[in-house]
Image (cartoon, coloured by chain):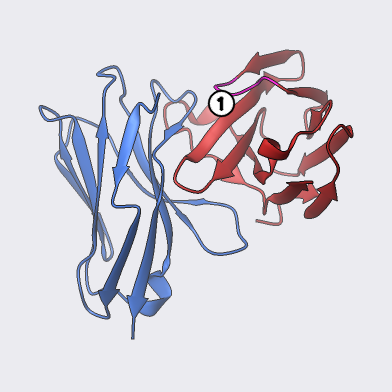
């Protein structure tokens, strides 16, 4: 979905390095999420933000941090990357105005490899 | 701890077959159950969703069956096509808040 973009699309880094994954959206949504996808484990929530001043930990936040720079931008940082953070990372957005129909719109993903 | 358990992990069917993917949940407070479809190299996208006040919902060739007492729901794909080959995720949420996803099912529909 071109309305949610992620950069970079692929990244290879080394253990101990700090990296940042960026997400931008043009959908005008207030809610943004970061997930990681691993085979057999589905999508697991790392952090989420319901508006610019709101940041919440998800199921697997250890080793990660986030920043909501603007309504349209939500970045994910790995402070000191480790090999078990090798995964596919997705950013998603949703509109609180839809109430209980919380359809989430996903970006194309970032494939991260930590050597 | 997975609150939504999905099976099978992978599934192969012939064109025209009816693949069935099952999900079970634990939290009875869940009140919204969507299915997401993911093609290779893409992010997941909403396919169909159901609320617990109905037992079945159809959209085209896709049907969700919901069994509230058993805390289970399933996705059926009628007359499956090779273009349906994708990974399917079930999910659940409470009052439109964060989604809890199942582990995913990789479906292959052979021509």
Q: Is residue A14 magenta?
A: no
Subunit under mark 1: A
Q: Is residue A56 visible?
A: yes
SS assignment for the magenta stretch, majority: loop
Residue B84: image x %, image y %? 39, 70
Q: Residue furthest bottom?
A: B111
Residue A66 as seen in the image, left or right of residue B44 = right
Residue at 65% from the left image edge and 45% from the top image edge: A87
Q: Secondary structure at mark 1?
A: helix
Which quadrant does the N terminus of chain A fall into? bottom right
B65 or A28: which is nearer to us? B65
Label 1 environment density (alpha carbons within 10 Å; few <14, some 14–19, many ≥20): some
x, y percentage for residue B16?
22, 79
Viewer-nearest residue: A93 or B44:
B44
Q: Which residue is mark 1?
A: A96
Place of residue B99 in the rendered image (x, y in percent of width and height, measured from the top left): 46, 30
- Residue at 71% in and 52% down: A111
Q: What range of the chain is rendered magenta?
A: A58-62
Horizontal and vertical percent position of residue A81 = 80, 33
Say which of B54 and B64 sits in front. B64
Up the image or down, B15 lies above or below B66; here it is below
Q: Is residue B60 above or below residue A42?
A: below
**Image: B95 above or below B76:** above
A26 left or right, relative to B42? right
Is residue A8 shown to the viewer in this render?
A: no
Q: Colour of chain B?
A: blue
Chain A rendered in what hue?
Answer: red
């Amino acid at each position: 979905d071109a309305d949610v973009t992620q950069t970079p699309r692929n990244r290879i880094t080394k253990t101990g390095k700090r990296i940042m994954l960026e997400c931008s959206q043009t959908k005008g949504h207030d809610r943004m999420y970061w997930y990681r996808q691993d085979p057999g484990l589905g999508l697991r929530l790392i952090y989420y933000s319901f508006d610019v001043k709101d940041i919440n930990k998800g199921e697997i936040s250890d080793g990660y941090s986030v920043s909501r720079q603007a309504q349209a931008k939500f970045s994910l940082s790995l402070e000191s990357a480790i090999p078990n953070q090798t995964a596919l990372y997705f950013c998603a957005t949703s509109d609180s105005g839809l109430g209980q129909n919380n359809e989430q719109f996903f970006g194309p993903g970032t494939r991260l490899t930590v050597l | 701890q997975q609150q939504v358990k999905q099976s099978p992990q992978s599934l192969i069917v012939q064109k025209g077959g009816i693949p069935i993917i099952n999900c079970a949940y634990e939290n009875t407070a869940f009140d919204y159950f969507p299915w997401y479809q993911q093609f290779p190299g893409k992010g997941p996208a909403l396919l169909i969703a159901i609320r617990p006040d109905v037992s079945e919902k159809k959209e085209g060739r896709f049907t969700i069956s919901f069994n509230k007492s058993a805390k289970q729901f399933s996705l059926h794909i009628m007359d499956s096509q090779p273009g349906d080959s994708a990974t399917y995720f079930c999910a659940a949420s409470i009052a439109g808040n964060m989604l809890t996803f199942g582990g995913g099912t990789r479906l292959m529909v052979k021509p």
